[in-house]
Amino acid sequence: MSDSHTHIEGASAVDLQHDRKKVSSLIDKILGLAESKGFGTSSLFAIRLAIEEGITNAFEHGHEGLDPSTPVHIEYAVSHNDIQIAIEDQGPGFSPDALPDPTLIENLSKPSGRGVMLMQAYMSEVHFNKAGNRVKLRYIRPS
Amino acid sequence: MTDSRLRISDNGGVTLVEFVDRNILDEANIQAINEEITAVIEQAQIPKILISFSNVDHLSSAALGALITINNKIREKNGELHLANIDPQIYEVFVITRLNKLFNIHDTTDEAHTAFAG
């Protein structure tokens, strides 16, 4: 469920299957819209990275143990000023605040746990809903 | 069995690994890459591996995870892993995650070759 922090006004929506071609096709579509609004190479790099991490988290962690055909709900809106993407899985949710800091020396050799921090590093805003099964990414055009 | 997503060659005792794809994002491909490099590590007495990112435009945290797993396996066998030709935007990902502190990263494969001990 979206809440005031993760709602996107006037968004396009799609239910996405765990299929690489469909994931790539959706991301290419969003990036195409961003490019048509004049977002540059470094913005497109940041947006692709963050969406990839969000969708991977939804399918790999959010949907762990669920039927593989369970879709992830995506909403997106691209404007001149910003790009907003919400990714909602049907799992029980998680607490992003409870994640260990992957940049600590003792965690550097651990192979997982970097997706959320990369989203936070590259996006202007990252909000999770209370349940922790929906994340809204917002990238504001650099001035 | 899928086609290899890697080009692997031997250069004076150092195994050079290059990527076929520009994007290393697909979990299935990342798993396959991990398994293929793991096979190289297992076959070597003391693995010396140089991974070139010259063709790579994007990688995900799952790809970073695979690199870490590979690095851990190489270290278990007292081997060496060096990385080279990383695009500046991707290098920034290594900096943000501080993995530039974990990996031996070089500008070019030539520079990386000279960094291998012995």
Image (cartoon, grey):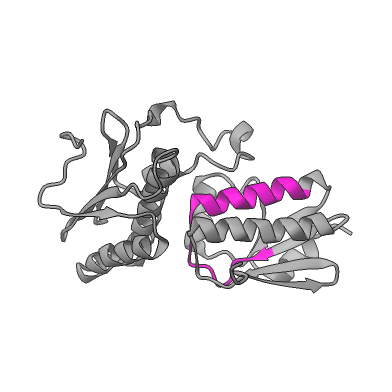
Give the percent coordinates (x, y) of residue B49: 75, 61
Regarding residue A42, the answer to whether it shows in the image is no
The residue at 56%/58% (across/down) is B30
Q: Considering the image in quadrants, where does the C terminus of chain B appear? A: bottom right
Percent x, y of residue A26: 30, 62
Q: Could you tell me residue A51's position as x and y percent? A: 35, 53
Q: Position of residue B102 (x, y in %)?
A: 65, 46
Q: Is residue B61 magenta?
A: yes
Image position of B8 with respect to B83: above or below: below
For the N terminus of chain B, the quadrant is bottom right
Residue at x 62% of width, y 34% of height: A105
Position of residue A124 relative to residue A40, above or below, is above
Task: Name the residue rendered at 52%, 50% in the picture.
Answer: B62
Q: Residue at x 55, y 61 (%)?
A: B29
Q: Quadrant of residue A17?
A: bottom left
A103 or B58: nearer the viewer: B58
Does the stretch in magenta take in A25?
Answer: no
Q: Is residue A37 something one can see in this rendering?
A: yes
Bounds of the magenta span? B51-74
Q: How many marks?
A: 0
Say which of A125 and B29 sits in front: B29
Which residue in the rendered view is the most extreme toward the left?
A: A10
